[in-house]
Amino acid sequence: MNRYQFLAVMFLVSTFGFINITSAQTDIVEGKDYIVLAKPQPTEDSANIEVLEFFWYGCPHCYSLHPHLKTWLMNIPGDVSFRYVPAILRANWATAAKIYYAIEAMAQADTLNDKIYDAIHRDKIDLHNESVLFDWIEKQGIDRKKFESAYNSFTVQNQVAKSTQMTRQYQLNGVPALIINGKYLTSGGMGATPQDTIKTLERLIEKARTE
């Protein structure tokens, strides 16, 4: 073996070694990075891999994850569907769920989601106080009466009831919680950073895809 052949072999060995190390570093561990749900739930979209984010507008960890999740959604894989689900772990979380479902009914969720998070966490506005909420909504250029009608509608009440049921079915004890294909759960508490949570989400999508 001449010098050039030796260097070529060493290059290949070091390259594959780097790949193996990188792969090991990006492996996710059950019980640490995610859990398998004891009672997997059926998905609404059987044609795709379904991802749900259970969130609460008042949660600082949800606020931290939200921009990273929003960026990820800009390039969501074609075989993945995504849905926000307002979690209801306590009775006073129902207001936030009503806010989300009302703006969704008015096709304003994409416009107002970021603003609601900022209002609560950055501007310290108490949007859980309905009179404050309705005033704030009007300041965003949204028809106050239409929002109040949606907020208090029977449809939104039914959606809140469904969110309560789903929160119990998935046996959630905190948010943000990401559910992949009704089977895997990862959360902000499992990742050291929001970026780690997104990486785990991507790995669990790959896992669901191979299954």
Image (cartoon, rainbow, N blue to C red):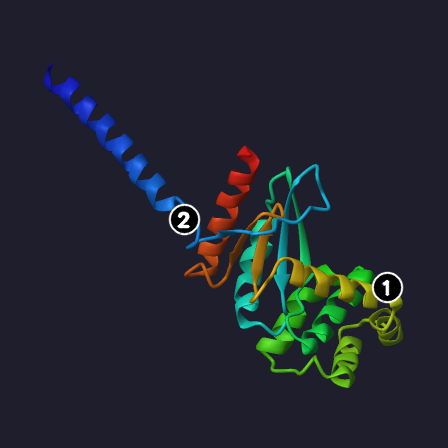
Q: Position of residue 172 (x, y in %)?
A: 59, 63
Amino acid marked by disc 1: Thr
Question: Is residue 185 visible to us here?
Answer: yes
Q: Is residue 54 above or below residue 24?
A: below
Residue positioned 57% across, 55% down in the render: 178
| Callout 2 crowding tier (Cα within 10 Å): few <14, some 14–19, many ≥20 | few
Q: Nearer the viewer, residue 133 or 152?
A: 152
Q: Residue furthest front?
A: 38
Residue positioned 60% across, 44% down in the render: 76
Camera-near label (1 vs 2) is 2
Q: Position of residue 87 (x, y in %)?
A: 66, 65
Q: Quadrant of the N terminus?
A: top left
Among the two numbered marks 1 and 2 on one chain, the one whose residue lies closer to the N terminus: 2
Tell me, for residue 72, which label it has, or none: none
Q: Position of residue 113 (x, y in %)?
A: 68, 65
Question: Is residue 103 visible to us here?
Answer: no
- Mark 2 element type: loop
Q: Position of residue 186 (x, y in %)?
A: 51, 55
Residue that numbered label 2 is attached to: 29
